[in-house]
Amino acid sequence: HKPRGKAARGLRFTPVAPNRADQVTVPEGYGQNVVIRWGDPILRGAPAFDPDRQSAQAQAGQFGYNNDFLSLLPLPRERGRQVLVANHEYTDEMLMFRGYDPANPTREQVEIAWAAHGLSVVVVEEQRRTGKLTAVPRHQLNRRLTLSSEFRLTGPVAGDRLVRTKADPRGVSVLGTLNNCAGGETPWGTTLHGEENFNQYFAHADRVTDPVAAARLKRYGISGGASERKWERFDDRFDLVKEPNEANRFGWVVELDPYDPQSTPRKRTALGRFKHEAAAPRLTRDGRPVVYMGDDERFDYFYKFVSSKRHMRGNSRIAHAHNMTLLDEGTLYVAKLTGDSPVRQIDGSGTLPADGEFDGGGAWIPLATAKSHGRAVSHVPGMTAQEVYVFTRQAADLVGATKMDRPEDVEPSPHSGKVYVALTNNSDRGKPGKAGADEANPRSLNKHGQVLELTEFWDRPDSTRFAWSLFLVAGDPDDPSTYFAGFPKERVSPISCPDNVAFDPHGNLWISTDGNALGTHDGLFGVATRGERRGELKQFLTVPTGAETCGPVIQDRRVLVAVQHPGEVDGASVEKPASTWPDGPGRLVRPSVVAVWRADGGDIGV
Ligand code: FEO
Ligand code: CA
Ligand code: CA
Ligand code: CA
């Protein structure tokens, strides 16, 4: 069948053509503005950004580097205002500092990088009539969390010997958060933040001789001698020989209460430790949160946590205190997916399923259960509960979970409850000695990725069984191995490397990309998930040279994206920039948050 006429409600815009422009390109009839950039002051006393007079102290009061996850939360008592929460995943010193010498960073540069990592909370304000969104500096809720801020470990690993260090012999208090990638929002008004590639910050794994410790480090990608940023020269905790447990204190899901600037963010150990991309909650019918989570690594796994405690409605102090314990008790599961038909090779890397659909069933395999007062039981023979939580990847290896093509962001549909998982790509699938294509990961040397749709049995998020199918198999629609939920391929935009996912108010899925392998820039796409236009995918915007598209937040009248690592191209530096977005020639390239709106003030895509 061929749907005619208008696109789905929410997706009625002229798609942006793939391009390589060093700018954010939006559909005709839409406007945009930069909401906030790396270095913009947000706290009282912070100076304006000055690329030649950067300091750690200034950076600690300014918006951080490489914005990724974004959340826009209501602020009902202040008209036209919302609370923006942003992750600052990592720093790119070559693009931050003039004359940066990667072999010999200075203490000041390292301390600026510590302050540029972490999280930001900043109140934003909409400008009437234009759709513009601008930051409100010095607002009382504005906050920076950096590598020097206190984070508390909670749940089954808090206090365990695996997380005790010289500076924190009780094993409960960590300085900072690292590599926060995507995240999620809870129904009780907090935000979740995934600590992803924390491995890169720890040095001297090559000097660890104990075979058990060495195998654990290797499984988490912690390898080699000096670290890329050489932080171990300035703080012993980044040296595995001097502080073997510090790395165990990263790789968690962080929970932040953005409405309380005095609160200490928590690292929720009951959700396991891996390269957390995102954490997306949904409530069971009796009000218990279930959190879906991906581990972004080639051949790693997809997980969920099911709380044993019910969410309490309202925002009284009692409800809030109760809700801040929901993610400390419950069971952690990993997904095993089984296809229902053989797949047939169609070209060098692609396959097609014999029954016409990439689909099948699956089971959630329990790994460990966390109980009150930090007690926990392991469901994995040969591992203690604490080992399961700290070395979750190894526990999942033992139970035979399905090796996926880099599970990135995940989002349950607020309308249907179906869970959408972005599997970004996997250049190693099918290589000698590596897992080959299966129905859920159907391409060898997978360059473009896919989006999986998971349906829990009886639509119960706490079910231990599910059905799944591939919603999209990404790429150029002319490539016979692509699939757009059955929608006619001549009428969709090309897409490659899905990373972040979000829903709009109409039930359409929006997908942002990272690493477009089709030769054009990354961008943001909307796709209908229901009805006769299901699978109709349209490109909404593209981002500048070298950038990935992150964060997306889709509201009725505004789309918000984080433009992460613009200008990050091999060999680029401050002296030899590949991008000068957003400030223009002669200025440093700056990761920034961008708002897009309809010029006539109407709703997005209607
Ligand atoms: Fe930080 Fe998996 O992207
Ligand atoms: Ca099938
Ligand atoms: Ca990501
Ligand atoms: Ca990514």
Image (cartoon, helix red, strand yellow):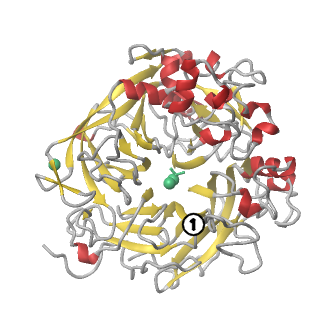
For the C terminus, which image quadrant? bottom left
At x 48%, y 86%, the residue is 29
Image position, residue 250 (x, y; %)? 62, 34
Compared across the picture, whether 234 is left or right of 367 comes to right
Asked whether mark 1 lies closer than 8 Å to ligand 4, one says: no
76 w.r.t. 295: above or below: below
Say which residue label 1 marks.
547
Badge 1: how crowded within 10 Å, few (<14), some, or many (20+)?
A: many
Image position, residue 208 (x, y; %)? 64, 24
546 w.r.t. 358: above or below: below
At x 67%, y 26%, the residue is 207
Q: Nearer the viewer, residue 408 or 101?
A: 101
Image position, residue 333 (x, y; %)? 38, 30
Q: Which amino acid lies under the numbered mark 1 shown in the image of this protein?
A: Ala
Q: Quadrant of residue 321?
A: top right
At x 62%, y 54%, the residue is 86
Compared across the picture, whether 520 is left or right of 108 comes to left
Q: Nearer the viewer, residue 228 or 402?
A: 228
At x 43%, y 80%, the residue is 16
Judged from the image, the secondary structure of the residue bearing numbered disc 1 is loop
Tag count in the figure?
Answer: 1
For the N terminus, which image quadrant? bottom left
494 w.r.t. 237: above or below: below
Compared across the picture, whether 397 is left or right of 256 comes to left
Image position, residue 420 (x, y; %)? 35, 51
**Is residue 511 visible from the viewing direction of this image?**
yes
394 w.r.t. 203: above or below: above
Compared across the picture, whether 45 is left or right of 136 comes to right
